Amino acid sequence: MKEKFLEIYRKNITRPGADKLLAWLETTDFFTAPASTRFHLSRPGGLVDHSVHVYERLDNLVTDEEGYPGSTFGEDFTISDETIAICGLLHDICKANFYTVEMRNRKNEQGQWEKYPFYVVDDQLPYGHGEKSVYIISGFMKLTREEAMAIRWHMGFSDTDFKGGGFSVGNAFGKFPLAVLTHIADLQATYLDEAEGE
Ligand SMILES: [Fe+2]
Ligand SMILES: [Fe+2]
């Protein structure tokens, strides 16, 4: 999946700074990190798999010729391939240098204690989630307003800002269709493509 990620990245993300961002990513654990500690793709490489899944889902949602089904965006709703790749591949870049492995004890089938590896959060840059991805990317290359909104609010109503009583996510969704679609793509990847057992 790393190869696929790199291929999509290099083909589509070409604005100034894109190469520096990719070079930085290579210095992090992005390509070996899990997508979560326990829930989806909690294994090495899970994060890059998830990022590619979201890209593919978003690409399908945006390039549907009729516009997103049930939407009023219609044919004039066009989003560039570069934007789709940025939002899909980089929305969870905040999870680079974010997890670490701890050893825990459990009883095996023979009733003996054994150690097993367990992912825990060890955030090296505690800046939030979507907002942290925007912050990291912006250190290397410029994001459009649409892209920044889409990445910032990709968690939708699970975002801690909303849980704390904020209304920005709903307001952002009302103004920026790409933010809605990126959130939908994230849900599709997490719950349809990465369902347990895969
Ligand atoms: Fe996320
Ligand atoms: Fe995600």
Image (cartoon, rainbow, N blue to C red):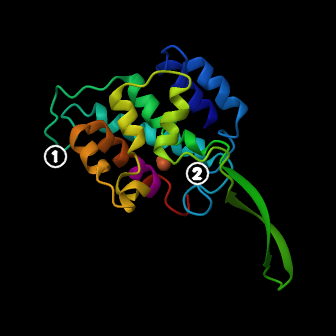
In what quadrant of the picture does the N terminus appear? top right
Q: Confirm or reject: label 2 Cβ below 8 Å from ligand 2.
A: yes
Which mark is first along the chain, 2 or 1? 2
Dominant secondary-structure state across the stretch colored magenta: helix
Which contiguous range is marked in magenta? 186-191
Which residue is situated farthest in the bottom direction here? Answer: 111
Q: Position of residue 41 (x, y in %)?
A: 58, 55
**Image side of residue 118 versus residue 59, left or right:** right
Disc 2 marks a residue whose amino acid type is Ala
Residue at 20% x, 43% y is 69
Q: Judging from the image, what secondary structure is the residue with disc 2 in?
A: loop
Residue 170 is labelled as none
**Image side of residue 64 versus residue 116, left or right:** left
Q: Judging from the image, what secondary structure is the residue with disc 1 in?
A: loop
Residue 149, quarter of picture = top left
Other-residue count near label 1 (Cα within 10 Å), few / some / many at <14 / 14–19 / ≥20: few
Q: Which residue matches tag 2?
A: 35
Q: Which residue matches tag 1?
A: 70
Q: Position of residue 152 (x, y in %)?
A: 41, 41
Residue 45 shown in magenta: no
Residue at 16% x, 46% y is 70
Q: Position of residue 172 (x, y in %)?
A: 28, 43
Residue 187 shown in magenta: yes
Residue 109, quarter of picture = bottom right
Disc 1 marks a residue whose amino acid type is Gly
